[in-house]
C-alpha cells in the first residue's frame, strides 16, 4: 500500500456502488390490466370506459357505483360521470383468446405492454404503432377522422409508477377546477342579471286578451246593474245592447 511502486486504490475502487434496481412488470400483471376492470376486478366486457389515468372499466359497473355513491377512495377521480369516457374499442373475434381487444388499424392485441391510446374527444382506441404507420400529419383520429387536441390523448393500461404520476397531475387539475367553480358561477349570475327581461310575443298576447276580458266583464257588471237601477248610465254600443236585450 505505497512505497512499493504501486498505486493507492481510491474509495470508488474499494466500494462498488449498488446498481439501480429496475422494476420490470411481469407479463402476467400487464395482461391483467388489459383483461380486467380496474374497479371491480371483473372480466372486461363492452361497453368499456376509461379514466384520465388510462385505467379500463366496465362502463355499467362504474355507472352503477357512481349512482350509488359507492366509489372507493382510491378511485375518487371517477366520482362523476364526466370523469370517465365510453370507448369505441374493437373486440377480438377469437373469443377463446386471453386478450379480448385489438387495434382496428394494425390488428395488434391490447396486452398491457404495447402502447395503446384512447382519444377523449371521440373515445376511439388504437395502438401507437398503428397511428405511426398511417403517418397522419393533422390532428385527426385515425379511426373516425374527428379532430382532437394533445390533451385528449390518454395512454391506456399504465404501470403503477406511471399511474401515480398521472394521479398527482390529475388531482392538481381537479383541485384548481373546484376552486374556479364559484368564480365562474358568480360571473355567469352577474352576466344573467345584466340581460334585459324580454317578454315573449305569446305572453304579450295573453296579457292583452286578459285585459280585454277584464274590460268586458266590467261593462257586463254595469249593464247588469242597470237592470235594477235606473240611475246607472251606460255607453250606448253594440256590446251593451246585446247584453241588455239578451242578443248573442
Image: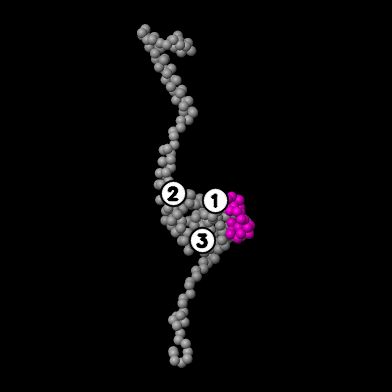
Of callouts 3 and 1, the N-terminal one: 1
Q: In the figure, is residue 202 to the left or right of 127?
A: left
Say which residue appears at 59% left-offset and 56% top-offset: 126
Of callouts 2 and 1, the N-terminal one: 2
Asked whether 192 or 45 is in front, the reply is 192
| Mark-to-mark CA distance, 2 and 1 | 27 Å
Q: Is residue 128 magenta?
A: yes
Q: Which mark is residue 121?
A: 1
Say which residue appears at 52% left-offset and 60% top-offset: 157
Q: Which dot, 2 or 1, sits closer to the camera?
A: 1
All told, the count of numbered labels is 3
Q: Which dot, 3 or 1, sits closer to the camera?
A: 1
The boundaries of the magenta stretch are 126-147
> What is the quadrant of the N terminus in the image?
bottom left
What residue is pinned by disc 3?
158
User: Where 231 sits versus 150, above or below?
Assistant: above
Residue 100 placement (x, y as % from top left):
58, 57
SS under mark 1:
loop
| Mark-to-mark CA distance, 3 and 1 | 20 Å
Query: From this viewpoint, is residue 207 visible?
Result: yes
Amino acid at each position: 500500500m505505497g512505497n512499493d511502486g504501486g498505486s493507492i486504490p481510491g474509495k470508488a475502487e474499494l466500494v462498488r456502488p449498488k446498481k439501480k434496481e429496475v422494476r420490470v412488470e411481469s407479463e402476467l400483471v400487464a395482461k391483467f390490466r388489459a383483461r380486467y376492470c380496474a374497479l371491480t376486478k371483473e372480466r372486461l366486457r363492452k361497453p368499456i370506459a376509461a379514466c384520465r389515468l388510462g385505467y379500463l372499466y366496465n362502463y355499467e359497473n362504474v355507472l352503477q357505483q357512481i349512482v350509488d355513491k359507492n366509489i372507493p377512495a382510491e378511485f375518487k377521480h371517477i366520482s362523476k360521470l364526466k370523469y370517465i369516457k365510453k370507448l369505441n374499442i374493437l373486440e377480438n373475434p377469437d373469443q377463446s383468446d386471453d386478450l379480448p381487444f385489438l387495434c382496428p388499424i394494425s390488428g395488434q392485441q391490447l396486452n398491457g405492454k404495447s402502447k395503446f391510446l384512447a382519444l377523449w374527444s371521440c373515445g376511439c382506441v388504437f395502438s401507437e404503432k398503428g397511428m405511426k404507420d398511417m403517418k397522419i400529419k393533422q390532428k385527426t383520429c385515425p379511426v373516425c377522422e374527428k379532430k382532437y387536441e394533445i390533451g385528449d390523448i390518454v395512454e391506456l393500461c399504465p404501470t403503477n409508477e406511471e399511474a401515480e404520476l398521472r394521479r398527482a397531475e390529475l388531482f392538481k387539475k381537479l383541485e384548481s377546477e373546484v376552486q374556479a367553480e364559484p368564480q365562474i358561477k358568480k360571473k355567469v349570475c352577474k352576466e344573467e342579471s345584466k340581460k334585459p327581461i324580454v317578454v315573449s310575443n305569446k305572453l304579450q298576447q295573453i296579457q292583452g286578451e286578459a285585459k280585454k276580458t277584464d274590460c268586458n266583464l266590467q261593462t257586463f257588471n254595469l249593464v247588469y246593474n242597470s237592470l235594477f237601477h235606473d240611475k246607472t248610465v251606460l255607453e250606448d254600443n253594440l256590446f251593451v245592447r246585446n247584453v241588455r236585450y239578451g242578443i248573442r
